[in-house]
Structures are given as C-alpha cells and as structure tokens.
Image (tube, rainbow, N blue to C red):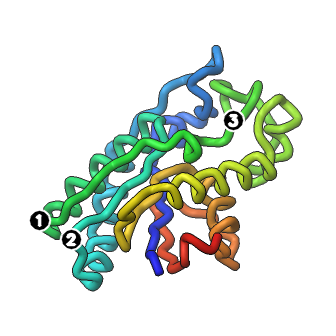
Amino acid sequence: MKRIALMRHGEGDHNVERFFSGNPNHPNYRVAHLTNEGRQQVKDSAKKMSSEIKKMNLKEMMIFVSPLPRTRQTAEILQENIFDCCPGLKIEEKVVDSLIEVDMGDFEGKNIEEFSYHPWNLDHYQKYGGEGVEDLLKRGRKFVDEINQLKNLPDFFVAVSHGSPLRYLAQVLGVKEDIKLDTAGFYLTNFDISSK
C-alpha cells in the first residue's frame, strides 16, 4: 500500500489577477508564478505534510509535478521545507505532462470576468476547444500507468498539480469524496497503486 499526497500549487498571479493560464502552447498563454502569499501557503502545507512524513519514518520519497512554473515553484518550496524538517530524506522530482493544468481552449490568457462560468465545471472549456471531464480522467489513468511502470517506487509520493486535474485524478484513484483543493491544499490517501 502506497501513500500519496495530491497537492495543488500555491496562489499564483493568475489567481490574483484573475486570468486563465493552462496551456503553454496556446498563442494567448500567460505565464503565472507564485505570489508571496502562495509561497507562504506552500511553506505552511509543507510543515503539515512533514509531520505525516515523520510518522512514516521514510528514507525516500518522490514528487511528481506539472510542468507549469507555478507547480514547479511549489515543488521546489515543498522540497526545501521538507528537507528542513526531515534531514537525510532523499527526494526525487519528476516532471509529468499528465499533471498539467486543464486545457482551457479559447479562454486561455483571457480575463476571467470576460466569461460567465463556474470554475469547477469543465463543460465551458470543452465548448471553446479545451478539455472536458473525460479528458482529465484519461490523463489521471495515464498518470497512474506511468507510476506503475516505475521501479522501486517509494512508499510516499506527492502529485503537485492543479485543481481540476487533481479532482479527477482522485476519482481515478478511487477517492469517494469530491476533492476541490484550495491553493497549496493537499489531500492524503492510501491506495494499492498496482490495482488501479
């Protein structure tokens, strides 16, 4: 039985300035970095996560991370703060494309106020050429398949991603709750990775 933390990135520029930022290949893509508040949120979450790690008496762990800057920054801060709390812990990081933010189609780079939408409803993205629920479930299964192919997977690992991809990854992992994480929030769960 492995233990995983599903972790959303800390608050980013896009959360404060209220613009869509998901697909770096879209011509309207705007890069989003963590704000100072977002950095502090990650530090606070890292302290909470470290207490769980200490209980497990781990020697190593892995962090799987979306390729976008705000998630990479989150993973970096997470590592630094876990090292401080758990010296000697070996942490490996792996960038995984299947954890990237939902493709928002023509919403990309635009101001949120320009559209009438609900942030957890993906139907609006799909109508504008982006991804829908089935796309994210497929990506969640792909992530699990990628994990299954790794040799010597540690007993604890973290998936640093974005709200919607984590919500549907949780479903793929068999989590019964509807996970809607706040910025820098995380959800711990046990599961037998090989049976998913």
* Mark 2 residue type: Lys
Percent across and percent down for residue 68 are: 47, 35
Q: Residues within 10 Å of mark 2 (few under 14, many from 20)?
A: some
Q: Identify the secondary structure beneath mark 3.
A: loop
**For residue 103, which numbered disc appears in the image?**
3
Instruction: Relative to 115, say whether 158 is above or below.
Output: below
Reply above or below: 107 against 102. above
Q: Determine the secondary structure under disc 1.
A: loop
The residue that appears at 85% across and 46% down in the rendered structure is 123
Q: Residue furthest right?
A: 127
User: Which mark, residue 59?
Assistant: 2
User: Going by the image, does 119 lie left or right of 17?
Assistant: right
Distance from disc 3 to disc 2, alpha carbons, whole Å, reads 36 Å
- Horizontal relation, residue 50 to residue 117: left or right: left
Sequence-wise first label, 1 or 2: 2
**At which x and y percent is residue 162?**
56, 50
Q: Is residue 95 left or right of residue 80?
A: right
- Between residue 42 and residue 24, name the one nearer to us: 24
Residue, far left: 87
Residue 119 has which mark? none
Determine the residue positioned at 27% across, 78% down: 51
- Residue 184 seen in this snapshot: no
Mark before the other along the chain sequence, 3 or 1: 1
- Judging from the image, what secondary structure is the residue with disc 2 in? loop
Q: Quadrant of residue 194?
A: bottom right
Q: Which residue is mark 1?
A: 88
Q: Residues within 10 Å of mark 3 (few under 14, many from 20)?
A: many
Q: Which one is in front in this view, the residue at disc 3 or the one at disc 2?
A: 2
In the displayed structure, would residue 187 be above or below residue 96?
below
Q: Give the residue type at disc 1.
A: Gly
